[in-house]
Amino acid sequence: MVTVATWNINSVRLRMPIVQRFLTEQSPDVLCLQEIKCQEDQFPYEAFHALGYEHFAVHGQKGYHGVATVSRVPIREFSRHDWQDNGEARHVGVELPDHQGMIVENVYVPAGGDEPDREINVKFGQKLDFLERMTRWADKVDRPTLIVGDFNIAPLESDVWNHKQLLKVVSHTPIEVESLQRFMDAHGWADIGRQHIPDPQRYYSWWSYRAKDWQANDRGRRLDHMWASPELAKQATGHRVHEDARGWTQPSDHVPLVTEFTL
C-alpha cells in the first residue's frame, strides 16, 4: 500500500501549521504541494523531518508558484519540465524506487487570468500553451505514472457549482475543457477522483476566499486532480477529499486529495 496526497497550499511557510495537522491526522506516504511560494533554501525541511518526512524534491521560486514533493518513503527526483516555457517553477517529478518504480508528477498549471481570450489576455494563452506542451509529453509516457496537482480546470458540469454561469469563466470554458481532454487522451489517463466519486456526484476541491461563508455558499470547483496511467489506475483502491481542511485556521482555498494504491 502507498498513499499519495496533493494540495495547493498557497504558501507552505505561512500554512505549515495546517500541513502539520494534515500529516499528523492522515499520514500519507507522499505529499505533493503546489504554490509553495518560496525558494528551495527557504523550504521548511526541519518541520517535515520532525513528522517523519525525510525525502524531498523541491522546485522553488521566490514569492510565486513553486512545487514540492515530500515523502516518508524513499523518492528520487525524476524530472523538471518547463511547460510554461519561461522558467517558472511549476513541475517536479519523482520516482518511488521501492514501489515498482512508480512515477509521481507534481504540477501547477497556470490559472490563466480573467479573460478567456488569448488575443487580449496573455496569461490565458500561456495556460493553453502549457497544456499543449503537457499533452506532447504525455504522448511519450512509458512508465506507471500518477500526475497530480492544481490543474486549474474543472472539466465536468458536476465539477462546478453552476455550469451555465461558469461557461465563460476561466477554469470551466469549453476551450480549456477541450485542451484538458486532449491531454487525457494523449496517454489514456484515468481520472482517479471520478473513478471513486462518479459523475454527476458533487466533487469540489476549491472555494474562493471571497465567500464570507464558504460552506453555506458552497460555490466550489474541482480544480485539483489525480490522474493515473491505465495500469496504475487499476491499483487505486481508495480516494478521499478532505473538505474539512477548508475550514481550518488560516486555510488554503484548496483542500487535500488522497489516493491509496495497492502495488
Image (cartoon, helix red, strand yellow):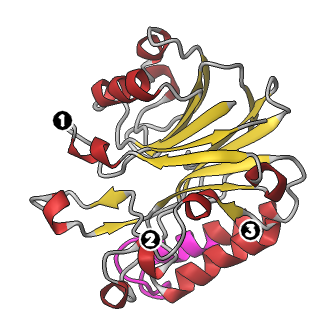
Residue 69 colored magenta?
no
Magenta segment, which residues? Answer: 112-129
Q: Quadrant of the C terminus?
A: top right
Dividing the picture into quarters, in which one does residue 196 lie?
bottom right
Residue count near mark 2 (Cα–Cα under 10 Å), binned few <14, some 14–19, many ≥20: few
Dot 1 corresponds to which residue?
249
Residue 50 in the image: above or below residue 94: above
Residue 127 colored magenta?
yes
Instruction: Identify the mark nearer the N-term, 1 or 2.
Output: 2
Residue 179 in the image: above or below residue 69: below
Q: Secondary structure at mark 2?
A: loop
Residue 201, numbered label: 2
Gap between marks 3 and 1, in whole Å? 37 Å
Dot 3 corresponds to which residue?
135
Residue 216: image location, x then y, percent: 14, 63
Gap between marks 2 and 3, in whole Å? 27 Å
**Residue 210 seen anywhere in this rendered image of the structure:** no
For this rendering, which residue is in front, 167 or 111?
A: 167
Residue at x-position 54% and y-position 77%: 125
Residue at x-position 56% and y-position 80%: 177
Q: Viewed as shown, does residue 159 lie left or right of 193?
A: left
